Image (spheres, rainbow, N blue to C red):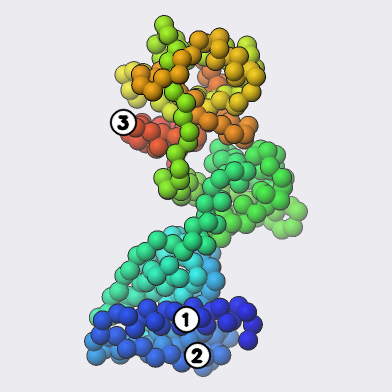
């Protein structure tokens, strides 16, 4: 028995235990090496009795499942229907199931179970739905996709979402190694968010679902630690004048920055009658220190009109735009930042997405 087969059987056993913990449920398993007919096999046939009602489950087991994997499983289940009675139920068990995979299975009324304990069983007369946090393995994998250099690839795809591109091209735009770009593209294909054409070195991709990718990024940020903010007060300047002065001083001292949050959103798609604070990403260095000194900033805990967002790498400033003499973070970055803001920031984020981002 291979290591993967052993893991699948262990997962099926865990699923069986989860079924037996349900009230009025009896469950017995028949492990099969192949389906009775046709080219497809099932990993297990489980006979349930739920409050006196018999149910037969055909189980397919996988280590991980994303929408692309689920489409293949659904095709397999469809082929198996010819070899089994029509009332047989199908179910996918996996160590981890992506949110999109779960949604697709639910839309097709196909059951699922993952190692985190989530269970969906839509059998006639025995509907079961248990939703639990994803297993740590999936959580860690998804978290890494939306951070560091991998996030720069996502940013590049969203900014250029209408384009077709090869690995080398997207790597150059995102300022990452081609291997990093290739890994991210492969992961996004598993989520079924990309289209592809061509083969080999000439293969190109296109981001078919930019809205879903942006939503997934927003969900991930909501569960991540907030960025470190340094609050300052610059005397004698209100927000509009401060924004222009900031741009001038940062340019003189060659400080790398990108204004974000409300101040940037107001420039891209006006929404509020006025703003009281400027928040900017600023790359640390001698130029940044000199610029802040010239602005005569004072560290405060309340009443800040200038907030500096801790910025670790130049990659966080990618795709900034020059607007009226000031560098603004990209609309995508501003949207994501606003979702973590206070007050009416979330309303402003949705307005920016609708008016400027468009997906």
- 236 relative to 310 in the view: left or right: left
The residue sitting at 44% across, 62% down in the picture is 134
| Residue identifier under label 1 | 12
Q: Which of 288 and 164 is in front in this view?
A: 288
| Residue 351, position as x, y percentages in the image | 36, 32
- 44 relative to 172 in the view: left or right: left
The residue sitting at 41% across, 6% down in the picture is 236
The residue sitting at 26% across, 89% down in the picture is 53
Is 159 rendered above or below residue 224?
above
Mark drawn on residue 227: none
| Residue identifier under label 3 | 343
Is 276 rendered above or below residue 85?
above
The answer to whether marks 1 and 3 mark residues whose Cβ atoms lie closer than 8 Å is no
Is 338 rendered above or below residue 236?
below
| Residue identifier under label 2 | 31
- Residue 215 visible in rendering: no
């Amino acid at each position: 028995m291979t290591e993967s087969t052993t893991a699948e059987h262990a997962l099926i056993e865990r699923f069986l235990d989860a079924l037996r913990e349900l009230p009025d449920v009896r469950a017995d398993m028949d492990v099969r090496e192949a389906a009775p007919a046709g080219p497809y096999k099932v990993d297990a046939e489980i006979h349930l009795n739920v409050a006196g009602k018999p149910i037969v489950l055909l189980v397919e087991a996988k280590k991980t499942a994303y929408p692309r994997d689920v489409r293949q499983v659904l095709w397999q289940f469809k082929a198996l229907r010819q070899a089994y009675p029509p009332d047989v139920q199908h179910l996918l068990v996996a160590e981890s199931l992506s949110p999109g995979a779960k949604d697709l299975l639910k839309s097709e009324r196909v059951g699922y179970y993952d190692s985190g304990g989530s269970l969906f069983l839509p059998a006639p007369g025995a509907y079961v739905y248990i939703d639990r946090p994803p297993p740590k393995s999936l959580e860690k994998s998804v978290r890494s996709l939306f951070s560091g250099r991998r996030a720069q690839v996502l940013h590049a795809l969203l900014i250029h979402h209408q384009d077709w591109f090869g690995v080398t091209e997207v790597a150059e735009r995102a300022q990452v190694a081609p291997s990093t770009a290739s890994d991210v593209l492969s992961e996004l294909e598993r989520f079924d968010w990309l289209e592809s054409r061509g083969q080999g070195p000439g293969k190109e991709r296109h981001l078919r679902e930019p809205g879903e990718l942006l939503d997934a990024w927003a969900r991930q940020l909501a569960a991540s630690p907030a960025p470190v903010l340094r609050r300052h007060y610059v005397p004698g300047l209100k927000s509009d004048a401060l924004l222009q002065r900031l741009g001038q001083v940062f340019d003189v001292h060659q400080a790398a920055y990108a204004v974000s949050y409300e101040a940037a959103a107001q420039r891209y798609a006006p929404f509020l009658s006025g703003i009281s604070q400027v928040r900017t990403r600023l790359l640390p260095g001698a130029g940044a220190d000199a610029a802040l000194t010239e602005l005569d900033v004072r560290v405060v805990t309340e009443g800040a009109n200038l907030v500096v967002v801790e910025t670790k790498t130049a990659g966080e400033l990618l795709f900034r735009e020059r607007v009226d003499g000031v560098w603004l973070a990209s609309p995508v970055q501003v949207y994501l930042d606003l979702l973590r803001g206070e007050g009416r920031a979330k309303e402003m984020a949705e307005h920016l997405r609708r008016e400027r981002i468009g997906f």
